[in-house]
Amino acid sequence: MNSCQRWIPLLSPFIDGELSPSGRIELERHLAHCTVCRARVGDFRAQSGLMRVGFEMLADEPNFDQFFEKVMARVTPDRLSLWEQWRLSVSELFVYHRTAMVSSLVTASVALLIGTSLILANTRTPDGYASALWSVRKVTTVPEAHVAPVVMAADRGNTIVWLVNHRHVLDSAAGEGSRGTATPEGLDSGTSTIEKLPLKQQRPHGGEL
Amino acid sequence: MRKKAGGSPFSSLVLAAAIAALPVMAYAEEQVQVQTEVILASNRGSIIDPPSLEKMKQQFSQKGFAFTSYRRLSGEKLTLKKKKTVEIKMPNQRTATVRLDGINQGTASVEIIISQDPSNVVITSTILTLGREGSLFQHAGDYDGGQLILSLSPAGAGHPRNGPQQSRFHSAAPIRSTLDSGAP
Amino acid sequence: MAIDDLTLVKRARGGDQRAFRLLVERYQRKVYSVALGMVKDKEEAMDVAQESFAKVYKYLQHFKGDSSFYTWLYRLTLNACIDVLRKRASRKGEHVQFDEEVQVDLSEAHIGVLGARLGTNPQKSLLRRELAEKIEEALGELPEKHRAIVLLRELEGMSYEDLAKTLQIPKGTVMSRLFHARVKLQKLLSEYAELGVNEDPSEDQ
């Protein structure tokens, strides 16, 4: 048994296939005539398999349906407000450049005042509204929802995006992403307003515009 | 920056400019405001409430919708920031998630996702760019015998709650300064 | 048609939320499993898993792409798990044993028992949840260091090289740590197997 001492720690990387080729050959030579070590290999392998299967079984239980959305929900609230971030970076600067900071404070506050007053005075074109008209770029529906988007452009940048039972879409003017013809959910009340939609006359702009 | 020795006038100026630029830069690029409303369109009666929805009725009937009644159920002015989405819960067990995709050369790109409660399964996603004029009417499913529509319009314009429409979007809009170009 | 991790990461960095969703869906279960193995509590494990992906999202811009995505992901997960365990231990007043070296038990008594009892096809042996729970229990008795490396190796099938990257230890340490962890686990599981809970003859392989 003493002669096995040097081999035993190698059994673990052996079952993982992580021994060097020469190491593996040497070990296999030992295993060829050592039943005890072969049994040990069996133990390691059994345990390894057991771990994997046992844990996969336990991990099958929870529902991961909303997992992604919950992840995104954690991301969205602001951790640090903008002013706190600014304050932190400024305080960092103070620690390392005290004299420079003090001497530049006046300059900084003047620049800051000018900057913020420009922002405040800026009422003509608010952020994000540089373009003249609104424009829908892309509408996607997921196949499982069984709805097809119908995109209708009205005048002066007004757009209607309507979701139609997939069954009601008579021609291939359906928007991007619609597939299948199963019973839709949520829109199957069959309200008369949907049927009044003159779909055949529509010229929808489904998909990328 | 930590390795440099402070003290020379030039570096003070650089620092000052950097500090001044921080809030201004971030402020200028990070947000957009939109007005949202949840509207119930139906054939129950002929109430148009508020009266400003008359315009919406016209646009809809132009496209073949024959609803007789348009009622605003709720409205909210949203400030969208990158990576900060806003959720609007709708009465038909659906949620509209509105997010700012980004601002590219002064034009904001916004995404609206309609998803089902409580499973959060996404039903549809609409991506659009904003402008001084225009609006989006996103169908959000049926409710109470009618159809729910989420409307998005420029903040301050469209369907004001009280009083006259603000005309700032319709006046000439000269570019004030490089600050509002949205570029850092 | 599976898109590789790095492409998804690049797209996600560019703001493509669908790419990020694909990444999450690809790893959510495994990350949860590792977390469950580490913290032993389902709710906390779910919490850790979600928090890990949230961190990934926040720090996506900082991911250099020099290590594989999943070693980075697991590192975040393990750190989150360790935080949970430390908080738990400090609440209870326990001293968290993180650097414990396990004595190697080479006694003959247990050799061959596991292998004989369960064979190398564990599926048939896992008809009962009890066994899975026993594994969880045995795992819980390991110090975190060993728990982590066993989980990553068995659940994720991580190569020693990736284990070294994830745990930020040299490859030699990976080898010995995994060995020690397995030996200890084996001892715990063999005791269980020998106690004869699985007396059902149909399970004898």
Image: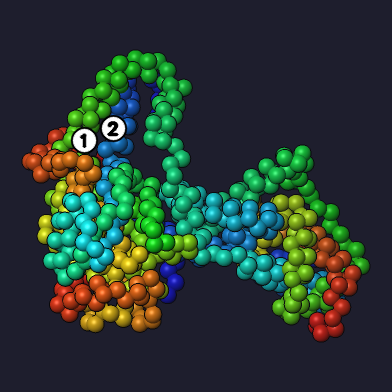
Contact between labelled residues 2 and 1, with CB atoms less than 8 Å apart: yes
Which residue in the rendered view is the most extreme toward the left? B172
Residue designated by label 2: B24
| Label of residue B179 in the image | 1
Residue A39, above or below A112: below
Task: Estimate the spatial distance between the alpha carbons at disc 1 and disc 2, rounded to whole Å.
Answer: 8 Å
Chain label for disc 1: B
In the image, what residue type sits under mark 2?
A: Val
Residue at 39% across / 31% down in the picture? A83
Which quadrant is home to the C terminus of chain C? bottom right
**Viewer-closest of A204 and C28:** A204
Residue at 75% across / 51% down in the picture? C143
Q: Is residue A133 left or right of residue B28?
A: left
Considering the numbered disc 1 on the image, is that residue within a helix, a strand or a loop? helix
Considering the numbered disc 2 on the image, is that residue within a helix, a strand or a loop? helix
Residue B25, above or below C84: above
Residue A198, above or below B160: below
In the image, what residue type sits under mark 1?
A: Leu
* Residue A49 on image: x %, y %: 71, 72
Residue at 21% across / 56% down in the picture? B48
Kindly indicate the quadrant of the structure image that contains residue A184: bottom left
How many numbered discs sit on the rendered protein?
2
**Viewer-closest of B156 and C43:** B156
| Label of residue A52 in the image | none
**Viewer-closest of C21 and A157:** A157
Circle 1 residues within 10 Å: few <14, some 14–19, many ≥20:
some
Which quadrant is home to the N terminus of chain C? bottom left
Q: Is residue C174 left or right of residue B30?
A: right
